[in-house]
Image (cartoon, grey):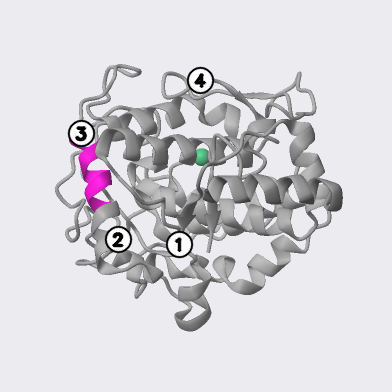
Amino acid sequence: MLGRIHRLACVCFVLLSPTVLLLAQAGAGFCPSLGTRQEWRDLTKGQKDQYISAVKCLQALPATGLVKAARTRFDDFQAAHINLTDEIHLVGQFLPWHRRFLNVFEETLRSECAFKGAIPYWDWSRDVDVFNSINNSPVFDPVTGFGGNGIYIPGYAGPFNNLTNLPGWVPGTGGGCVPTGPFASYNLSLGPGTIPTNHCLTRAFNDEYAWALSSAQIANTTKQPTFENFRIELEGQPITPTMKLHDGGHFAVGAEMLNTYSSPGDPVFYLHHANLDRIWWIWQQMDLPERLFDVSGRSSVDPPFVNITLAFELKMLNLAPLVPIRDVMDPRSQPLCYTYI
Ligand SMILES: [Cu+2]
């Protein structure tokens, strides 16, 4: 019945709203219901437990063989990201690819781990606007969150000891294994970078980068007039001279999260990227007729590249079938079917 009302409402809106007309033109699939993605601290204790349990379930299921060194289904996702890293960052498909990646992760939590909810997001601005720090974030609560900082290693400069080369580098506070929370005992098999090693989950909180995650920085991002300006402003270095929302989050958490290739080894990766995806959706909704299907940007970092279009296909390797960017432009349509509150 609900579906029918929705469908009827759509028929009316086709006459009235250019947005729905665009949807109709794209042939976007109708969603019987929408998942609700919420900020971590707005979840109930029960919802938090359910999400953590589902991720732990994925970490207990065997890998499907994309990469030999991957041990679990959770590692399969990290493996796909590692293998595709050079094709999906600093390019036009950066946001669409990560939107689809989270969608497949969310669907896998549901289909293989009986998860009933949606991926939560981490709105860092709620931490840094108040504390200028991510240290006290409920996301990193040792009991109801993802565990906290890594154990302090004096002089820590990353797994390859090369972070001191980065512009504006200041030493972080942790660097070692995360001793608290639900992932303290998880044994990662992939990373750092493209190297497979057995290691614990590491973090190195760095509040020197907290400023990059403020609501003022979000506003700087959402005020961009075109997708081209928006995606560059959001993704950050090395295309921009200073840190932006995407790299700011990776730097502020540090260690596992700081590695472009292997960062999905930290379960917080998915919450960080859900927030970036939410900000993209906020930006789209500010002018839906213009922005719902607005994509652009080079297709690869190195030439020869083309300008991506809606027909550009997003690879998920053995995680999921190829889909064109067109199919991930509207979170309210198949295969995505979610909304943010
Ligand atoms: Cu990525």
Residue segment shown in magenta = 52-60
* Residue annotated with mark 3: 198
Q: Secondary structure at mark 1?
A: loop
Q: Is mark 3 within 8 Å of ligand 1?
A: no
C-alpha gap between disc 3 and disc 2: 31 Å
Q: Amino acid at mark 3?
A: Asn
Q: CA distance from mark 1 to mark 3?
A: 33 Å
Q: Main secondary structure of the magenta part?
A: helix
Q: Which residue is mark 4?
A: 321
Find out if the beta carbon at label 2 lies less than 8 Å from the nearest ligand 1 atom. no
Q: Which residue appears farthest toward the bottom when viewing the image?
A: 130
Which of the two discs, 2 and 1, labels the residue nearer the N terminus? 1
* Residue drawn at (53%, 79%) of the image: 129
Q: Quadrant of residue 330?
A: top right
Q: What SS does tag 4 mark?
A: loop
Q: Is there a contact, CB below 8 Å, between mark 4 and mark 1?
A: no
Q: Is residue 58 above or below residue 43?
A: above
Mark on residue 47? 2
**Disc 1 + disc 3, Cβ < 8 Å:** no
- Residue 66, compared with residue 105, is above or below; it is above
Disc 4 crowd rating (10 Å Cα; few below 14, some 14-19, many 20+) is few
**Are the residues at dot 2 and dot 4 in contact (C-beta closer than 8 Å)?**
no
Marks 4, 3: nearer the viewer: 4
> Which residue carries the number 1 mark?
38
Q: Secondary structure at mark 3?
A: loop
Q: Residues within 10 Å of mark 3 (few under 14, many from 20)?
A: few
Q: Is mark 4 within 8 Å of ligand 1?
A: no
